[in-house]
Amino acid sequence: MHRDVLIVGFGLAGWALTEALTKEGKSFVVFDPFVESSSRIATGIYNPVVLKRFRAIYHVDELMAHSVPFYKHPKYASALNPMPIWRVFASESEQNDWAVASDNSTLRTYLGASVSHLKNDNILAPSGMGEVLHTGWVNTSLLLHQAHKHLLQKQAFVSELFSYKDLIITSKGVEYGQWKATHIIFAEGVGIRKNPWFSNLPVVPNKGEWLIVKCPGLHLKYMLKGSVFIVPLGGDRYRVGATYAHSFSSLTPTNESKGWLMECFKKYIALPFEVESHGTGVRPTVPDRKPLVGKHPKYPALNCVNGLGSRGILWAPFLASSLINCLFNKQDIPVEVDLTRYFKV
Ligand SMILES: Cc1cc2nc3c(=O)[nH]c(=O)nc-3n(C[C@H](O)[C@H](O)[C@H](O)COP(=O)(O)OP(=O)(O)OC[C@H]3O[C@@H](n4cnc5c(N)ncnc54)[C@H](O)[C@@H]3O)c2cc1C
């Protein structure tokens, strides 16, 4: 049973690797128990701007041009929800900052120049709002379920936890049970901490909590961003979130976060609402806020894609293609995201 690549983990990183390998005409098999992942509970927003500071994200044009088309493929059309984000200004001075930013040569493509006072009386935004363009959200649970079903049919998915101790590194690649491959790529999110070859990389779990609320009469047709995102899910349902916490003792939802998220919703929406559900998940973050991708310096058959942080949607396809191009087309990994910056063998 020979494959070009074994993939461990099927969150957004693992999924994007399967897409990039398929495009390259390479064979692979994925290992993942497919029970839960950060990717399947993500809000799924793709957004080219850091909305706290009105700054473009790292390599913005390249990431947008490369990654968004992955989700535009007709087979994932039902998971893609393109819609603008309206950023609510906290003050007149923020409005001025926006005006300056929207005139910047990089940001001009992504920030609408005019400040709007929308005619939805149910939105509380006395200082106005600005529109972020080319944004939307991906129903990641739907996308990953569709892709999982397809890979099972192709016999390219093993629904099991990968057992690190059973991996044999050979002069030609790796062997794992009945499988032989030239390369193995680990994409386990925060699960990397149990990986004997990559656990020294600084992937820091960051807990996020969110609410699904029902708010009849709001009729929001775009995403709203104030202290948190409010994302229309269809009907009267909205997703509100998320929180960020590096320090936490369990993944259980907390009343404190629920209360805070409800206050955030009330701050921007002048209608009664009901909380339908409350959930949590963990982001794989890195201290310098850049992902980790590349080969193990000592065992070149072993590779890793991790540290997607809070922007998994935009990072996953870009990083997957970077690594596949490195493995099969001898291209260099972009230096800023190369994992060797942290690696101590
Ligand atoms: C509340 C919340 C909201 C978010 N919202 C957004 C958003 O709006 N936009 C955005 O871009 N990002 C968002 N993110 C971030 C995004 O979810 C992550 O960046 C992304 O999902 C990370 O993907 P991943 O594939 O690296 O890891 P994961 O999704 O965690 O996937 C790792 C997979 O590896 C598997 N695995 C682990 N160990 C093993 C093993 N030994 N054997 C086999 N399989 C294994 C796990 O089962 C899992 O399926 C959000 C995150 C959270 C928590």
Image (cartoon, rainbow, N blue to C red):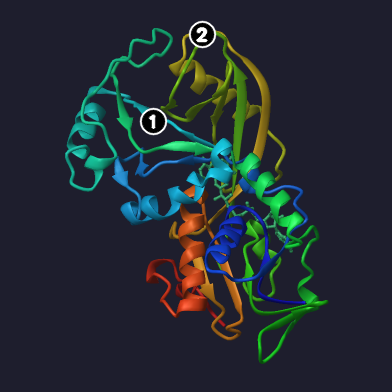
Label annotation for residue 221? none
Which residue is depicted at the point 45% across and 59% down?
Answer: 318
State the image quarter where residue 179 is shown: bottom right
Q: Which quarter shows the N terminus?
A: bottom right
For image coordinates 65% across by 64% down, the residue present is: 192
How crowded is the residue under tag 2: few (<14 C-alpha within 10 Å), some, or many (20+)? some
Label 1 and label 2: CA atoms lie apart by 22 Å
Please tell me whether mark 1 or mark 2 is closer to you in this view: 1
Q: Which residue is mark 1?
A: 84
Report which residue position mark 2 lands on.
271
Location of the C terminus (image quadrant): bottom right
Q: What secondary structure is marked by label 1?
A: loop
Q: Are marks 1 and 2 in contact (CB under 8 Å)?
A: no
Residue 301, percent from left and from top: 61, 81
**Residue 110: where, in percent of width, then height?**
29, 39
Q: From the top left corner, tell me how far across and down residue 96 is, in percent.
A: 19, 29
Q: Nearer the viewer, residue 109 or 213?
A: 109
Q: Is residue 181 above or below residue 21?
A: below
Residue 112 x, y percent position in the rendering: 25, 31
Query: Going by the image, does 164 lie left or right of 328?
Result: right
Q: Relative to 115, is 26 on the left or the right?
A: right
Beta carbon of the mark 2 residue lies under 8 A of ligand 1: no
Q: Amino acid at mark 1?
A: Pro
SS of the residue under disc 2: loop
What's under tag 2, amino acid-wise? Answer: Leu
